[in-house]
Image (cartoon, rainbow, N blue to C red):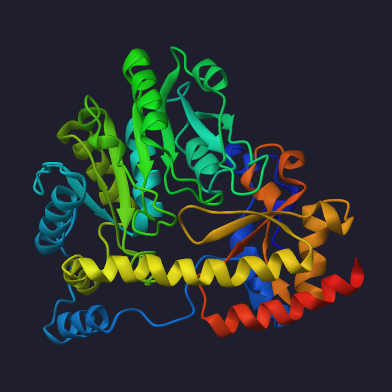
Amino acid sequence: MAEGISSLSTSKKHFLSDKVSQFTESVIRDMTRQAMLYGAVNLAQGFPDFAAPAEIKQAARAAIDGDVNQYAITWGAKNLRNAIARQMGLWQEMAVDPEKEITVCCGSTEAMISTLLAVCNAGDEVVIFEPFYENYGPDSVLSGARPRFVKLRPPVSEGGEWTFDEKELRAAFDKHTKAIILNTPNNPTGKVFTRAELELIRDLCIEFDVLAITDEIYEHILYDGTEHISMASLEGMQDRTVTINGMSKTYSVTGWRVGWAVGPEKITNAIRKVHDFLTVGAPAPLQEAGAAALSLPAEYYAKLAERYRVRRDHLMPALEAAGFRCFRPRGAYYVMTDISAFGFANDVEFTKYLVKDVGVAAVPGSSFYRDARDGARQVRFAFCKKLETLDAAAEKLEKLRARK
């Protein structure tokens, strides 16, 4: 090394952001890498292993063949924004201006971080229910805010619901609270928030002057007669809600990265600024395919939910036979389980054993909690897979029975 030139290892300057020390890489995505390493059945990451609808793929091909290959308008192609506004009117009876209130992003993940960066300042707090989708905590930190967690408690009886304590939720709101993130249907629990629960949250948002940021990516994946209600559709909330959604889950195209944020004009303008300098825009031909996807008939969504119900009811008996206690999901396509019967020290040790020795990848529950101890007895499985994939996993889980 030339004289006077020091290496990074000998530098006295701290080059890293303090923010990155507050969270780890995605555990979910790491479990997919482990599934590939050990040749395991991947029930960890929530992506389908079956084909997307033919109509959507054809629309994408047609857009590419039609030379829709350059930048779309930064905040989203007009056809897609019009389709989003139309469908929100149809599904949630909400009037949305596609020119002023919609920002198309590179997936709902970017929509969430763009929103938080657009609204949060240092010292702000963001309320998050836990267990939570693992991006929400780091997103809050990256935006300069401090996350405050409110527990969802698992069902105490078979067929029960995940619940939260109203007093605990109220105690999380104060003068520093900028926003609450609400994911319904919920990942990882499968909880679908009821109208009464949403109205309680609505009342707190109004009382404390707080913004609601809702992740509704699983809105069409519902079971057992549950109903998805968008927070923005409640009286008094459209002007203080950012609704986040996307194509990934409803149309089985998680790799296309087309999502959107819908909110009042002033907040949308701020989101658009952040989005512009984060990613410029989502893939242009896939936005045109998104407009086609949102034009699918109503029966598509009914069949979607029914096919996932079949998968849920296919996997859960196999998990229960292997020794898991399952918390029955009412929405989304995951099932949280209790692993107490297996006698492992914690969920991380169990999932290491499961992927390497049994041949099934799942997500340790601790990755969905602020305090790893709260999830140490829980593991999440994804059932957005072919039935033969679920059968292959069930066959491998037979090994667990012999170990008990």
| Vertical relation: 109 (above or below) 144 | below
Indicate the position of residue 262 as horizontal and vertical percent values.
23, 44
| Vertical relation: 126 (above or below) 222 | above
Residue lying at 34% horizontally and 40% vertically, measured from the top left: 115
Q: Is residue 114 left or right of residue 369?
A: left
Indicate the position of residue 135 as horizontal and vertical percent values.
51, 48
Indicate the position of residue 238 as horizontal and vertical percent values.
21, 32
Q: Which of the 4 image quadrants contains residue 184?
A: top left
Q: Is residue 158 left or right of residue 103?
A: right
Q: Which of the 4 image quadrants contains residue 223?
A: bottom left
The C terminus lies in which quarter of the figure? bottom right
Q: Which of the 4 image quadrants contains residue 292?
A: bottom left
Q: Is residue 389 left or right of residue 303?
A: right
Nearest the viewer among 123 and 85 is 85
Indicate the position of residue 284 as horizontal and vertical percent values.
21, 69
Q: Is residue 53 left or right of residue 339?
A: left
Residue 357 seen in the figure: no
Residue lying at 42% horizontally and 30% vertically, measured from the top left: 197
Nearest the viewer among 91 and 145 is 91
Nearest the viewer among 152 and 3 is 152
Q: How many marks are shown on the rendered structure? A: 0
Residue 344 seen in the figure: yes
